[in-house]
Amino acid sequence: MSDTPAIEFTSVSRWFGDTVALADVSFTAAGGVIGLLGHNGAGKSTTLKLCGGFSTPSSGAVRIFGVNPRREPDVYRRIGIVPDHSPPWPFLSAREVVELSARLHKVRDYRGAAAEAIATVDLEDAADRRVGEFSHGMRQRVKLAQALAHDPELLLLDEPLNGLDPAQRGHVIELLTRLGTEGRTVIVSSHVLHEVERMAPRVLVLVNGHLVAEGSTEAIRQLISERPRRVLVRPGGDPRALARALLEMTSVDAVRIDDGTVEIETSDPTALGVALPQAARKLDDVLASIQPVGDDLESVYAYLHQRARGQAR
Amino acid sequence: MIGPVVRLTLRALVLQKRTLLLAAVALLPVVMAFVYALAHPAGSNRHDFYSGLVQQLFVPTVASLVSLVFGVSAFGDEREDGTILYLVATPQPRIELAGAKILAAWLASMILLVPSLVISGLLGLGSEASASLIGWPLLGVATASLAYCAVAAWLSLYTRRPVVIGVLYILLWESSIATFAASAKKLSISAYGRAFVAHVLPQSSPAVTSTGVAAVVLAVVVSVALWATARGLSHRELP
């Protein structure tokens, strides 16, 4: 393995007409598993397509092991790719797909390499069946096997856990973790943080084509958990009395009353979870409902986006 | 290493449903020759019938349509379903990938066109059939088909409607404009294919050029389309 980073993005933007798919993204990747996190349409697939040489940046530069793969296809000897929406040829057997991939990657003992890759993804029993007969999860494993067959230094995996059952997910996560600790660079895209954090010590978060956060998985998790949250509370009694009581608490940042509902903003939801029932008890109030707002993944990404824009300003 | 890609593409082309439709198109000249052989009107000239069949139906319509569809499918289907990524993400030289695809499309075309032309020739010419009367038209069909396949493969990487563009070229340009505008013939693949036929069969209109020049022109068309297709693989947006 050389010292040149496996991936080097320098101010990369990619747009299609008026749509910006990727905006001024820069990062390098050299060894280990890296999670590429973002909602659907965030730019994950575009990033992987650029890494894979299937697209050309509108501006900026993409270097894979120091070269542009579109101009120097020989670099594909060192790259294994699992595309998201492209199952392999349905009329070929799993073994044929993996052998073909190994052969085209110039592996001398392509049959042996294919057999090994098929064993790695635990697909020996179905290796001679046609891919067209496979379930989604099995196709994912064929895709993974064809990407591993030539023993690549860089793996680009677009949503590789999609369609896998929990046991298969565990197996693939274990495999990718091992590949990362061996010194290979493994880029795994996903829109689920807890899935990524099981294998990737480093995460890149994309929102609307912008790289909004980058760092260790723990740091990103911390950042997300520290974001301000909003909770809607409908008290049984006087909402103004509850609002007054809440404002005295350190875990509450702001309170607003709207149509009998108290909207609480907090940066410490755990403390609020303890304090809120205590305040209600003190007022001899019975809370009719407690509803968190913006706790979905989209809101998390929106927060990271806003935060990144704020920092940029 | 074009062998595995040729075999893969050939398998994909032969297995597709539209191959049945193309086989029906290729069967058309056989049916016409069969009907002619049964009827064979007194005083009719077998050479004239066969010449008309080859020059007005086989080369400009049957061979061109079959080659166009196979040429487009060689890359077009893989672009649509995304399997092209598994070929492009390999260290194979782009010119070899493009060459393998065009070769596979041409072989698939030949699987349908060669038996069709040979059987039509044998039925149409009857006892007058000879190796040269079938061989030269076959050469014309084979060279024109290769050129159509190469251009179709190139179109499939650069446009969203390669079949529509190809059919418009065949029907509007080659079968209409080029039939009455002599200079337009110079931009007609089928006209160069027919130049080989003119070597042994009577012509309804003068051939566009000699067989030697036709061979050179078609070789240039194939080379340029091959180069442009290979370039498309490293420049076009892939799925």
Image (tube, coloured by chain):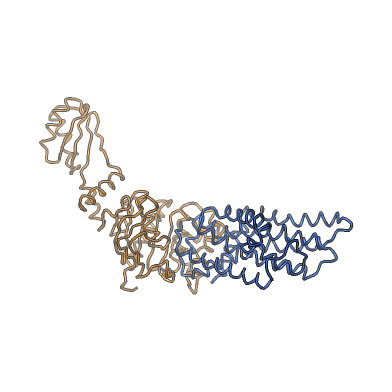
Chain colours: A orange, B blue
Above or below residue A120? Residue A261 is above
Taking depth in this image into account, of B135 and A224 the one nearest to the observer is B135
Q: Quadrant of residue B214?
A: bottom right
Q: Picture coordinates of residue A69 (x, y %)?
A: 41, 67
Q: Picture coordinates of residue B2 (x, y %)?
A: 55, 70
Taking depth in this image into account, of B94 and A253 the one nearest to the observer is B94
Residue located at (33% from left, 74% from top): A2
Q: Quadrant of the N terminus of chain A?
A: bottom left
Q: Residue lying at the far right in this picture: please name it.
A: B42
Q: Viewed as shown, does residue A224 lie left or right of B192?
A: left
Residue located at (51% from left, 59% from top): B157
Q: Picture coordinates of residue A141 (x, y %)?
A: 45, 58
Q: Residue lying at the far left in this picture: please name it.
A: A248
Q: Picture coordinates of residue A215 (x, y %)?
A: 25, 58
Q: Viewed as shown, does residue A215 lie left or right of B219?
A: left
Number of marks present in the image shown: 0
Q: Quadrant of residue A121?
A: bottom left
